[in-house]
Image (tube, rainbow, N blue to C red):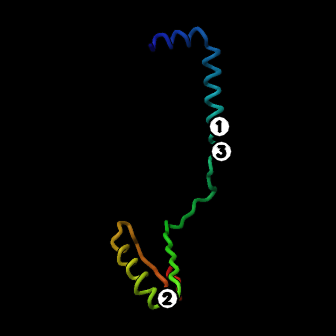
């Protein structure tokens, strides 16, 4: 199989050259389409959870939403810190 491919390439070097140029062209086009930022974002990954229980006070939101979330997430691997804020009907 390989011998036939090599002999065909030797017999038609123009086709091999055209295929190589086509591959280079596709590679350059693909590279130009990449979404590359000039400056990477140095901010660490962050997760924001927003819940909106209607009519709850900040204390209820803290007790029934924020604290259980913090307790469940505190053992997560790689977690550096947890910060929370509970407003009237809006835990974040």
Q: Considering the numbered disc 1 on the image, is that residue within a helix, a strand or a loop?
A: helix
Q: Which mark is residue 72?
A: none
Q: Considering the numbered disc 3 on the image, is that residue within a helix, a strand or a loop?
A: helix
- Decide: is 16 above or below 43: above
Residue receiving disc 1: 28
User: Is 35 displayed left or right of 49 in the figure?
Assistant: right
Crowdedness near tag 1: few (<14), some (14–19) or many (≥20) residues, C-alpha within 10 Å: few
The image shows residue 47 at horizontal and vertical percentages of 49, 70
Residue receiving disc 3: 33
- Decide: is 47 above or below 64: above
Crowdedness near tag 2: few (<14), some (14–19) or many (≥20) residues, C-alpha within 10 Å: some
Q: Residue at x 50, y 13 (%)?
A: 6
Q: Residue at x 62, y 42 (%)?
A: 31
The image shows residue 41 at horizontal and vertical percentages of 57, 63
Q: Considering the numbered disc 2 on the image, is that residue within a helix, a strand or a loop?
A: loop
The image shows residue 92 at horizontal and vertical percentages of 50, 79
Choose between 64 and 8: the one closer to the eye. 64
Q: Residue at x 46, y 11 (%)?
A: 3
Rounded to the nearest angstrom, the CA distance separating label 1 from label 2 is 57 Å
Crowdedness near tag 3: few (<14), some (14–19) or many (≥20) residues, C-alpha within 10 Å: few
Choose between 70 and 45: the one closer to the eye. 70
Comparing marks 1 and 2, which lies closer to the viewer? 2
Residue receiving disc 2: 56
- Lower position in the chain sequence, tag 3 or tag 1: 1
Rounded to the nearest angstrom, the CA distance separating label 3 from label 1 is 9 Å
User: Is 22 displayed left or right of 78 in the figure?
Assistant: right
Q: Quadrant of the N terminus?
A: top left
Q: Residue at x 62, y 47 (%)?
A: 34
- Lower position in the chain sequence, tag 2 or tag 3: 3
- Decide: is 43 above or below 16: below
Rounded to the nearest angstrom, the CA distance separating label 2 from label 3 is 48 Å
């Amino acid at each position: 199989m390989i011998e036939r491919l090599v002999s065909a390439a030797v017999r038609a070097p123009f086709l091999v050259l055209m295929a190589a140029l086509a591959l280079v062209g596709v590679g350059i086009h693909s590279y130009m389409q990449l979404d590359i930022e000039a400056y990477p974002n140095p901010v660490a990954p962050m997760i924001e959870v927003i819940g909106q229980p209607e009519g709850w006070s900040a204390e209820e939101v803290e007790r029934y939403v924020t604290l259980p979330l913090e307790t469940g997430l505190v053992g997560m691997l790689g977690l550096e810190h947890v910060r929370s804020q509970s407003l009237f009907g809006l835990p974040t």
